Image: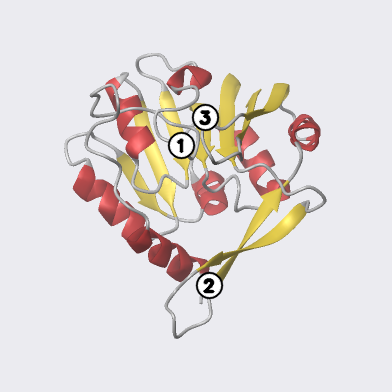
Amino acid sequence: MTDTAAWDTYSKQNPERRPVNAAGETTWFNWTQYPDHGPGAEILNITPGANVLDLGCGKAGNLAHLATLGAHPVGVDISTAQIEAAEARWPGSKLELHQENATHFLAESEEQFDAVFSVFGAAWFTDPAALLPAVHHRLRPGGVFAFSQRPPVEGCYGCQASYITHSNDEDPLVVKRWDYEPDQWKGLLETHGFTTATARVVPAPPGPKKIGTLLVRAQG
């Protein structure tokens, strides 16, 4: 199975974003795996007219919110099913969506971006040795690159395997992800030319689940 098939399978399993959040808003930005928790779009320093790229945009809920802030929202996802779901969910949001591998898109695009972000997306599932220089090349000077994902399991760093269940009668689909501690991410970003890099774990909200969210931010 290709990565495209794996992420198409994931798309069908992943539920749609809620019609409204706890505050009654129809669009919102969420970095974490928990609803109504953590920081929002302010991490990206968005201003009206900003050119913003989401790597691994999924069903594009975060991107649709940035459109309401006046940004020009561009999304890339390797999954055709995810792109089709995004187009169906946000028909009036003027999202520019591309079904493409993230590094291929960055290499082929001639656009410059004020912000590039990834929420449990391509920044987690792409070799940083390939992705980070490609992002830096497309980011305007002083622009923001930010991404979130689960923190690493202690002692399990670098390329790891993630499993996507296909069916009870078939083996799970396998995709690669890259896990590092916060200080390691800072070092990788600085090696590839980023500045003011920060990386921290946002604690989980009160409740039985204790795994927080790794949030990384840097400037080009």
Q: Secondary structure at mark 3?
A: loop
Closer to the chain start, of discs 1 and 3, is 1
Q: Report helix, strand or loop for mark 1.
A: loop
Q: Position of residue 215 (x, y in %)?
A: 61, 31
**Residue 192 occupies quadrant:** top right
Count of numbered circles on the image: 3
Q: Secondary structure at mark 2?
A: strand
Along the horizontal axis of the image, is 71 left or right of 216? left
Dot 2 or dot 1, earlier in sequence: 1
Q: Residue furthest left?
A: 92
Label 1: which residue? 34
- Asked if marks 2 and 1 touch (Cβ < 8 Å), the reply is no
Callout 3–callout 2 Cβ contact below 8 Å: no
**Residue drawn at point x = 37 percent, y = 55 percent:** 14
The amino acid at mark 1 is: Tyr
Q: What residue sits 71% from the left and 27% below the top?
A: 194
- Percent position of residue 135, x then y: 60, 37
Q: Which residue is mark 3?
A: 205
